Image (spheres, grey):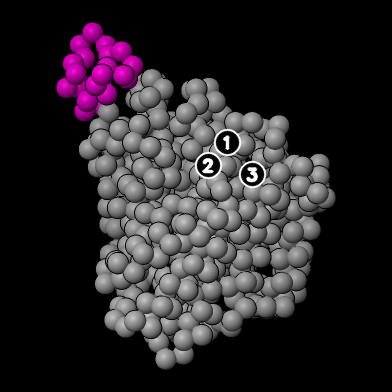
Amino acid sequence: MTDSAQSSAPGPDATPLSDGWRKRAALWGGAVAVALAAIALAKASDLAYRTFSIAFHASPWFALAITPAMFALMAWVSSRRDLHVTRGSGIPQVIAALEQPVAWREAQLSLRVAAWKFALTVGGLLGGASIGREGPTVHIGAGLMQSIGRHFGFTDPRQGARFILAGGAAGIAAAFNAPLAGVVFAIEELSGTFEHRFSGTLLTAVIVGGVVSLALLGNYTYFGHVATAVPSRMEWLAMLVAALACGLLGGAYSRLLLALTLSTAPVIGTLRFRHPVVFAAACGVLLALMGIGYGLGTFGTGYAQASSLLAGHADVGAAFGPVKFVANLLSYLAGIPGGLFSPALAVGAGLGHDIAMLFPHLSPSAIVLVGMCAYLTGVTQAPLTSAVITMEMTDSGAMLLPILAAVLLARGASSLVCKAPVYRALAQRLLVPASATPS
């Protein structure tokens, strides 16, 4: 059956050709809207975190008031019955929505939910949360694209799934300025199979999202150009160590996250489920105390620290990776909206830097880069997405083979610790809400 036949019935004067162009207009116009939303979220998030940074530089003790208060506010808003779906990354909600009826999708991906996801993500960064904006961008993009598709009359469930898929992929493409990563992410992470046919029209929609971002923000690479290669055997050995270690630690993070977000988790599960606002404030206090003890790198996405490590200008100590690991876990457990991608890349960069210190005669940039993609793979268990995102964000084509080897090793290491990919496990909980707290 063609895509046109699966859409809503055309009017008496409609033709398959006009219906096909209607679908293209909806997808491509939606991709532009998603890209604009992604850029707006990026700018608002950067402004929010800069505001927090100014307060922190004035006095680190301000964090002890700002972070718990903002965490409590975010948890209070997202604890409302109709806004539970704004909590966490947003990617599990999109994965779950792909296979659910239209009414269920509307509750998860409405424009109202997208608007609140935007505002709450910005609020989290204003409070110094260690979260990313890429997962929320996927959630917002899927919601926008679904609403636009329905406005154009595409109400068939399978057709709706394709709009959701395109919206999520366009969100990743615009957030990272990485169109190829958006395509791979849609196939590997969102749909999980090739059952959802990724047609040329959907592919073009993802590219449109990347082109709009490129046009408005310029030809930039997310982490800049990383000029490094792996010529020696010792560097291959160092990367092998980094891939295995970061893959294991990424799997450990996912296992901890899945265990501690269960309502049956001892103490934490009960507090998180019955007293979400108090629990979020407590997480904020712990995060603020960590920040007072360690520094500003505890908070936010970790973009600046990861960039400095990739450039070989290490302005963080050996504790950055472990501190960021705990900070990201605390922020997610708080139940506030926020993603995992950017903090995971920052944790991986920190861990890669620590491993590079064991090989002082080697270039640290290559090991940091491998640590980033390996840890992200360990957390998500999506090796192709991690590899493509890392290469597109760093313009590191010379590292293609080392990165591919690293993500495959990390995927195997992660699965030894955490059996289920974290996003799919969280998506499954959304379908059985009695088994776990909203994530």
Image vertical order of residue 369 relative to residue 110, above or below: below
Secondary structure under tag 3 reads loop
**Residue depicted at x 43% and y 45%:** 189
Q: Which residues are magenta?
A: 1-22
Callout 3 crowding tier (Cα within 10 Å): few <14, some 14–19, many ≥20: many
Q: Earlier in the sequence, mark 3 or mark 1?
A: 1
Residue 268 visible within the image? yes
Mark 1: amino acid: Gln
Secondary structure under tag 2 reads helix
Residue 151 visible within the image? no
Question: Horizontal placement of 430 versus 189: left or right?
Answer: right
From the image, which quarter does the N terminus lie in? top left
Residue receiving disc 2: 424
Residue receiving disc 3: 439
**Residue depicted at x 61% and y 59%:** 252
Mark pair 3, 1: CA separation: 11 Å
Please say if the residues under marks 2 and 1 sit with CB atoms less than 8 Å apart.
yes
Please say if the residues under marks 3 and 1 sit with CB atoms less than 8 Å apart.
no
